[in-house]
Image (cartoon, rainbow, N blue to C red):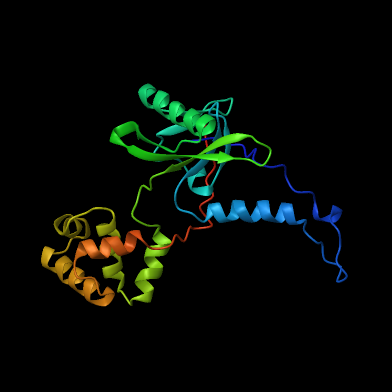
Amino acid sequence: MIEMLDRSAPAPEPARHWPVSREGTPRVPVPALQAELRAAMADEVDYAMVLVSCDMQLVHANRAARRGLEDGVAYSDACGELHVRCRVDQAGLAAAVHAACSRGLRGYVQLSGPQGASAAVAVVPQRGRNGTDAALLTFSRAQVCESLSLNAFARHHGLTAGETRVLEAVCSGHSAAAIARRHGVAVTTVRTQLTSLRAKTSAKTVNDLLRTMALLPPMVNVLQRGQLHTS
């Protein structure tokens, strides 16, 4: 898990210090509003995204990262430096970050975590207006899609509660037999529900359905505001 202090920008001034419009409402400065909207936009993405400096200091993390990175494949120490569980991975990630910051190279790193967990990380160079260099780390998702996106998809296509549960299980990688055991029903029942799912969503195969789910736009639950913790 990660403990993060957002050092990307100073906190905006209180509204009482902002200019007031003719209607008497505070007028938010454009730079402060833009910074707030950029942070809010990143929070709606269901990929964990972390901005780090060249020396691996954490600068900013979106909500998905603050909830925890891939079951603990990464964490921060008391000084706010990003670490990963495997020392070999740490060296590889640090090298990719340095290459991004110093030479503008994009990179890819595969990280290992506890209990067989793993995560792919894209390392993308970022250049600030003041000439400072940083790297954006985007972690692979732990699931095909967010539950809110899945539920919205299910409502749109008129899926029953049982079909929605089957869809959730399929997106988690479970087979028809495993779903049947989990729900205490016959395998034929699950297969009938899968057939109905494909018919309602115009998916020819289960793989087609999974591809559709993977391409859904994210709808992140605003109530999931977990804090980052030092490991």
The one of 185 and 160 positioned closer to us in this rendering: 160
Q: Is residue 106 left or right of residue 180?
A: right
Tell me what residue is drawn at x 18 percent, y 72 percent.
195
Q: Residue 119's x, y, as percent?
A: 36, 39
Q: Residue reaching furthest front?
A: 103
Residue 205 image-quadrant placement:
bottom left
Residue 72 image-quadrant placement:
top left
Q: Residue 190's x, y, as percent?
A: 17, 66
Tell me what residue is drawn at x 53 percent, y 48 percent.
63
Q: Residue 97's x, y, as percent?
A: 48, 31
Q: Is residue 112 above or below residue 41?
A: above
Instruction: Please say whether residue 195 is visible from this viewpoint.
Output: yes
Q: Is residue 191 above or below residue 178?
A: below
Q: Number of numbered discs present? A: 0
The one of 150 and 8 positioned closer to us in this rendering: 8
Residue 156 image-quadrant placement:
bottom left
Q: Is residue 229 above or below residue 22?
A: above
Q: Residue 140's x, y, as percent?
A: 38, 45
Instruction: Please say whether residue 231 is visible from this viewpoint.
Output: no
Tell me what residue is drawn at x 22 percent, y 76 percent.
199
